[in-house]
Structure formats: C-alpha cells, structure tokens
Image (cartoon, rainbow, N blue to C red):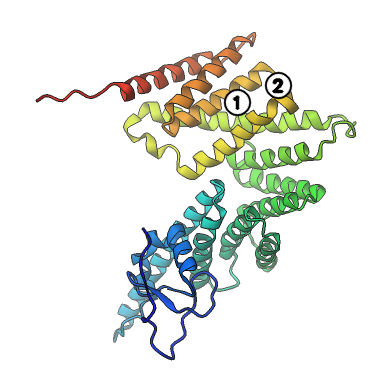
C-alpha cells in the first residue's frame, strides 16, 4: 500500500520539485515529508519502484543540517551524509537493475533516477561514477520503447566518459554493451556488433574470458547474428551458423562452470545457500540460458553434449533459486542428453542434482506432524 499525500504541506512561496519529472510539485509524502510530486500518478509510481524502501532513509539526507559550532562535528555530519548517500545510490541501483532484468521497465525508472540523483550529490554532475545510472536509465527507456530518451541518456554517458581519460575498463564495457543494445533496438546490426565486440574486449581484459559478465557479451552478439539471418551470405572460414553455435557454447560453458561452483558452495554450507547467488544474477542467468534453449532447435541443431550442458545449467539455476520442480525437469532432460553422448563427464553431477531436487520436493510435500 503506497503512502498518502498531503496537498497542504508546501509553505507558500517555497518551490518544490517533483521526484519523477522535476516539474513544480504540489503534493508531499506524509511519511518522510521530504519528497514531493506534481500528481498522484507520479507519487504512486515512485512508491511502487523505490520510495517504499527508502522513505525513512531520505529524511536525514534531505533535512537541513543542524548548526555545529565545532569543525569536527561538521566534518562528522558530512561524512555520515556521504555514507547515507552512497548506500541509497547502491540500493536504488540494485533495485533498478533487478527490475530491468525482470522487464519491469516502468518500475525501474524512478529507482534509476534516484541512483543518478545520489551519484550527482556525491560526485558532482560531471563524474564518471554517474555513468552506471545513465546506462540503467537508457536500458529502462529502451524497454519502454522510448529510444530518443535512451539516446539522450547514452549521450550524457558517452560525453562523461570522453572527459575521463583514465576511465575504467568496467565502465567502458558497460557503455559499449548498452550502446549495442540501443543499436540492436534500432536494427542497426553492424554498429551493434561493433559495440558488443568492444564490450567483450573490455570485459575480458578486466574480468577474463571465463567470466559470466563476458559471457553476456557473447550472448548479445549471438542474438544479433540470429536477427541478421545471414546464413546464406556469410561464406568465410566460419558461417554465421557456426558463429552462433560457438558464441552460444561460450555462454553456456562459462555459466555452467560458475553454477557448478555455486552448487559446491551450496553442498558445503546448505543452511546459507541463499548467499551463493543473488536475485539479479539469478534473473540474468535464467534470461540468457532460457533464450538459448528456446532458439536452439531452429537455429543451432546442437550436439547432445551442448544440450546436456545447457539443461544442466538451467537445472542448477532453478535449484539455487529454490524452484525444485523445474530443477528436476531440467535435470532429467540433462540426463537424457548425457546418455546420448559417447563420453560425458556430467552424468554423476547431473544425477546428484536430480537426487537433491527429489529430496527437497519430498520434504516440501510431506506434511508436518505436530504433537498435541
């Protein structure tokens, strides 16, 4: 339930600005008294996105600082405010990222805007630390079909990066990835592939070729090849068909290795399994692997070893996210594909996962008995 609003809270003659659109505000949140809106729709949108989680956190940040006689007290207050702003920036960024991955783009916008606002207060309006928030805003706008708004956000991000000669490779890979997404949405596939290639280059330099972050760059490149449908045109050493297979296999093998390590973590410390994978990583892995599973019959015609690894990866991600029914379903598929391989080193781990999923399902379906 979103909080009420107070139309009489603004003192006459004092301008307040809407949290969502920065137009003149006439309404106020009655819980924190430091957040304002121009209409009820914007207040509800902000509440559903991020405000319900940060309402009380905004009070010490947006309330005028008390007067301190001593410089040490003023410095202490400033440091506390900076820590609070940094926490808010990270929290809102995580919320926005999760909603973008969940394709809840409208809900992502207010959270991304708050992340950008906090970043500006912390670092100034020209700092490279603003780029991740600009990129999130661009992705959310792309999801809503607002490509002109996305271009505007990316223009700000590019300009900021151009003025930062020592910009990190992490920021560069994130920028090129989002530019690739924009050009894909605009069907400018050549430019999209160029940006995704730069994305993979910078990500692999910073994180390595085996990183799951790099794997997503391969996945996005594979998507572009799928959209191009140039199977009858590309006649070089590798056809587009082979490129898609190789890129898909790179994504799967990287995620399979990563998820296998998480399963080991789960087995070693089962009572803290929730620490092995977060919601954002879970959504990202499921999105990529499910897309490869959906497209493989028509486009890839893969070897059973490919399908076994893909199904096993999906089984592991479902298991780690406590979806034991789906984990068992994909685990059994993986076992069938594994049987079709002359040699498979996955059979033992697949069977172990199936047994774990069956055990959890049995315990979930067994009613608890209470002693009266």
- For disc 1, the neighbor class at 10 Å (few under 14, some 14 to 19, many from 20) is many
Q: Nearer the viewer, residue 217 or 150?
A: 150
Residue furthest bottom in the image: 13
Please name whichever residue, 208 or 21, is drawn nearer the observer in this view of the structure: 21
- Residue 126, located in which quarter of the rendered image? bottom right
- Res. 346 in view: no
Q: Position of residue 160 (x, y in %)?
A: 65, 67
**Can the viewer see residue 323?**
yes
| Residue at the image position 44 percent from the left and 30 percent from the top | 323
Write the residue at 75% across / 32% down.
244
Calculate the distance from the C-alpha at mark 2 to the C-alpha at mark 1: 10 Å
On screen, 198 above or below 338? below
Residue at which label 1 appears: 310
Percent position (x, y) of residue 277? 45, 38
Q: Residue at x 58, y 69 (%)?
A: 127
Left or right: 250 as drawn, with respect to 91: right
The part of the image, by quadrant, that contains residue 63 is bottom left
- Give the x, y percent position of residue 201: 70, 46
| Mark carried by residue 189 | none
Q: Is residue 182 above or below residue 51?
A: above
| Mark found first going from the N terminus, 2 or 1 | 2
Q: Which residue is mark 2?
A: 302
Q: Secondary structure at mark 1?
A: helix
Tell me where residue 276 sits by quadrant: top left
Count of residue discs: 2
Is the C terminus in the top left, top right, bottom left or bottom right quadrant? top left
- Residue contact between numbered discs 2 and 1, judged by CB atoms under 8 Å: yes
């Amino acid at each position: 339930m979103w909080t009420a609003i107070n139309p009489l809270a603004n003192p006459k003659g004092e301008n307040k600005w809407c949290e969502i659109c920065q137009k003149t505000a006439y309404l106020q949140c009655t819980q924190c008294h430091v957040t304002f809106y121009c209409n009820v729709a914007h207040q509800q949108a902000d509440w559903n996105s991020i405000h319900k989680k940060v309402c009380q956190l905004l009070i010490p940040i947006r309330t005028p600082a008390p007067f301190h006689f001593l410089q040490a007290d003023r410095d202490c207050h400033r440091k506390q405010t900076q820590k609070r702003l940094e926490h808010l920036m990270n929290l809102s960024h995580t919320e926005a990222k999760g909603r973008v991955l969940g394709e809840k783009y409208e809900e992502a916008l207010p959270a991304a805007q708050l992340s950008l606002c906090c970043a500006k207060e912390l670092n100034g309006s020209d700092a490279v630390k603003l780029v991740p928030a600009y990129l999130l805003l661009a992705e959310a706008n792309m999801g809503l079909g607002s490509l002109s708004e996305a271009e505007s956000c990316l223009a700000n991000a590019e300009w900021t990066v151009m003025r930062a000669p020592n910009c990190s490779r992490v920021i560069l890979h994130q920028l090129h990835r989002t530019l690739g997404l924009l050009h894909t949405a605009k069907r400018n596939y050549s430019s999209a592939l160029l940006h995704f290639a730069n994305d993979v280059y910078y990500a692999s330099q910073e994180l390595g070729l085996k990183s799951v972050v790099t794997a997503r760059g391969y996945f996005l490149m594979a998507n572009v090849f799928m959209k191009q449908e140039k199977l009858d045109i590309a006649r070089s050493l590798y056809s587009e068909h082979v490129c898609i297979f190789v890129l898909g296999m790179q994504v799967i093998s990287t995620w399979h290795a990563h998820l296998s390590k998480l399963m080991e973590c789960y087995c070693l410390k089962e009572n803290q399994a929730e620490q092995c994978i977060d919601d954002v990583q879970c959504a990202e892995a499921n999105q990529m692997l499910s897309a490869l599973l959906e497209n493989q019959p028509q486009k890839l015609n893969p070897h059973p070893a490919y399908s076994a690894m893909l199904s096993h990866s999906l089984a592991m991600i479902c298991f780690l996210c406590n979806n034991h029914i789906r984990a068992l379903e994909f685990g059994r598929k993986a076992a069938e594909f594994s049987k079709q391989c002359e040699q498979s080193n996955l059979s033992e781990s697949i069977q172990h996962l199936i047994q774990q999923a069956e055990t959890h399902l049995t315990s979930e379906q067994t009613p608890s008995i209470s002693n009266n």
